[in-house]
Image (tube, grey):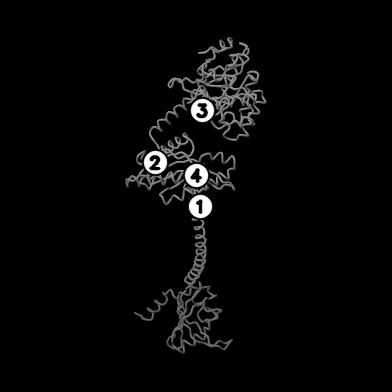
Amino acid sequence: MNTNHFFRSIIESLPELIVVATPVSDQETGETDFLIEYVNAAWEVISGSRCETILGKILSHTIYGKSTIPWQELGKEVLKSKRPVHCEHFSELVEKWLDITLIKLEGNHVCLNITDITELKQSEVRLKQQNMRLSSLSSELATSKNNLKIKLDKIETLNTNLEQLAYYDRLTELPNRTKFNSMLKDILCQAKHGETRFALAIFDIDNLKTLNDSLGYDAGDELIRQIAMRLNLFRKDGVLASRFGGDEFLLIMNHYDHDAELLYLINGIQESLREPYSLMSTEVKSSVSIGVATFPEDADTMHNLLKYADIALTDAKRRGKNTLSFFHTIMQETLLQRINLEQKLFRAMENEEFELYYQPQFDVGTRQLRGFEALARWNDMELGAVSPDRFIPVAEETRLIIPLGEWIMRNACTTLQEWQSVHGFNGILSVNISPIQLKHSDFLDILRKVLADTGIPPRSLELEITEGILINDFNESVRILEEIKALGVGISLDDFGTGYSSLSYLQYLPLTTLKIDKSFIENITQTKSREFDITNAIVTLVNKLGLDTIAEGVETGEQLEAIREIKCKTIQGYLTGKPLPKKDCPALIKSGIYTLE
C-alpha cells in the first residue's frame, strides 16, 4: 500500500479545510506572507470554487481577506515557536466564519486546519439574542410579577369588599341573611352532634315608621346602627346578631343551660334596647318585640326554627309593643286559621259573598228614625257566619279593606239612593271607613265618584271613622277629613273614649257626630257610676259644640233612661233595633219609629 497516497486520501476526505503554505516575501510590501501550496477538497465546499484557482496564491489575499488579525505575524510565530496558534476569523472572501489552527510542518511550511463554524457562530448569535430576549422577558416577568402582585392585592381587597357586600349588611356591618343562614346551619349541626341547646330570636323595632316619618330616614338608619352596636355588646354572652333587612334582626343564643338563663339574657337585650338613643340631636326611646324558638324543644331544622320564631314574633306584635313571645304549637294553629281566613277572604271578594245589613238609629226624644249604619256581613260555606271583628282586621292587614271598603260604600249609597227615590227616606246612612282606606291616595276620588254615580245628597251620607286615624300623621288626617266635610258629607267619630283620642281633639277634627262607645253604656245605669259621670260630661260638652251624639250598644231600658237623663240625642243598639237585611228596612222606614224589643 502506498502510505502517502493513503494519508492523502484521508486528508482529501476531511470536512475541515487543510491548507499548506510556505513563507514568501511580498513583493509589494516586502513583508513575509505565505504562499498556498496545497488545499484539500473542502475548499470547494467552503468557497464554491475549484482548488486549482487558489493554488499559488498569497494566503492573505484569498482565505484571510481583510482582517484585524496579524496573520503574517502569527505565521512567523508558529514557525519560530513551533507551537500551534488558534483563532477565529470571518472571511469576507468566502463570507463564512472560520476556526483556524496554524501548525508548523517539517521544513519551513505552515498547515492551516480550517473549520467552517458559520452555523456555530449563527447559533451563538441566536443564543445571544435568545439570552437577550430571555433577559428582557425575565425583566418583563419581574415587572409582570410585581404588577401581578399589585393586582392580586387589589383582587384580595376586592374579594374582601365583595365578601363584605355579599355576607354583611352595609348599614350595620352585621351578618346578612345569607351569612346568618350559613352560621345557623353550622351551629345547628354542632348542636345536634354535641347534644346542646340554643335559641333563635327574631325581633322588629316598634314604631320605626313613625320615627322615619317624624325625624326622617337618616334618623331611622342611625337608630338601626345604634341597635346593632348594642347587640354586639352581647357577643361575650354567646349572642350572634344579624340584620335581615328593614327593621328585622335575628339572634342566635347558644350559651345557656336553663330556660331561666335564656329569659334573663333576652330580658337584658330588651332592656338595653329600651335605653334612650341620641338621634339628630334628639333623645329618642324605642323598643322591640321579640319572638323566640328553641332547639331542640321547638324544632330541629333550620326551616322550622326560622318559621316558628317568626310565628312567635307575630304573636308578640299582636299583643302590643315591647313584648316577648316564646313559640307554642297553639300559635301555629292560630296562624294557620288566620291564613285560611285570609285565603277565604280573597275568595269571598271574588265571589261577592258579602252582604250589607243596616242597624237603625233613633232620636231619643222623639223615637223617630234618624238613619242606619251599614254593616258588612260574611257567611262562608265552611266557616259559617264570620264576625266582622275577625275578618276586618285581616282585611286591613292584607289591604283588602281598600276594595272591600269601596264595595261597601258604593253598595250602601246605591241602597240609600233607592230608599230616597222609592220610599221617601230622608235620614242619614252611616258607612264605616278604615284608617287604611281613608289614607289611600284614591279615596277622595272614589268618594266623589260614588256621590256622582248615585246622585245622593252628600248630607245624607255620614262616614264613620275610628280613633285609629289619630295614631299616625294627625295633620294629614285632619286635611282629608276637612275635604270630606267640604263635600257636604258628615263625619262621625266611632268608639270615642276607648283609645287614643281625648276631648282636646274635638276642637281640631271637623266632626258632625260623636258616638259614645258601648263600654261606657254597659255600666251607665249603676248609681253614681264613674261611666255615668264621664258620659254625662262628654255629652254635655259635645252638645255645646253643636255635634250630634249617638250612644251605641244600648240593650236595656235602664240604659235608655240613663241616656235620656244625660241628654244624648241618638241611640243605637239591640234594644231599639238589631241589624236588618236590606229587604226588611223599607217597613221600618215607613213606620219611622222604634218599638222596644
Between residues 495 and 179, which one lies in front from this camera angle? 495
Give neighbour class at mark 4: few <14, some 14-19, many 20+ (Cα, 10 Å): some
Give neighbour class at mark 3: few <14, some 14-19, many 20+ (Cα, 10 Å): many
- Which corner quadrant of the image does residue 16 belong to? bottom left
Number of marks: 4
Q: Position of residue 221 (x, y in %)?
A: 55, 45
Looking at numbered disc 1 in the image, what kind of residue is underneath it? Asn
**Residue matched to label 2:** 302
Looking at numbered disc 2 in the image, what kind of residue is underneath it? Met
* 370 shown above or below 45: above
Q: Position of residue 196 (x, y in %)?
A: 34, 46
Q: Position of residue 265 (x, y in %)?
A: 41, 46
Between residues 108 and 84, which one lies in front from this camera angle? 84
**Residue matched to label 1:** 161
* 107 shown above or below 360: below
Front of the two marks 3 and 1? 3
State yes or no: discs 3 and 1 in contact (Cβ < 8 Å): no
* CA separation in Å, label 2 and label 3: 31 Å
Q: Quadrant of the N terminus?
A: bottom left
Front of the two marks 1 and 2? 2
Q: Secondary structure at mark 1?
A: helix
What number is the disc on residue 274?
4
Q: Secondary structure at mark 3?
A: helix
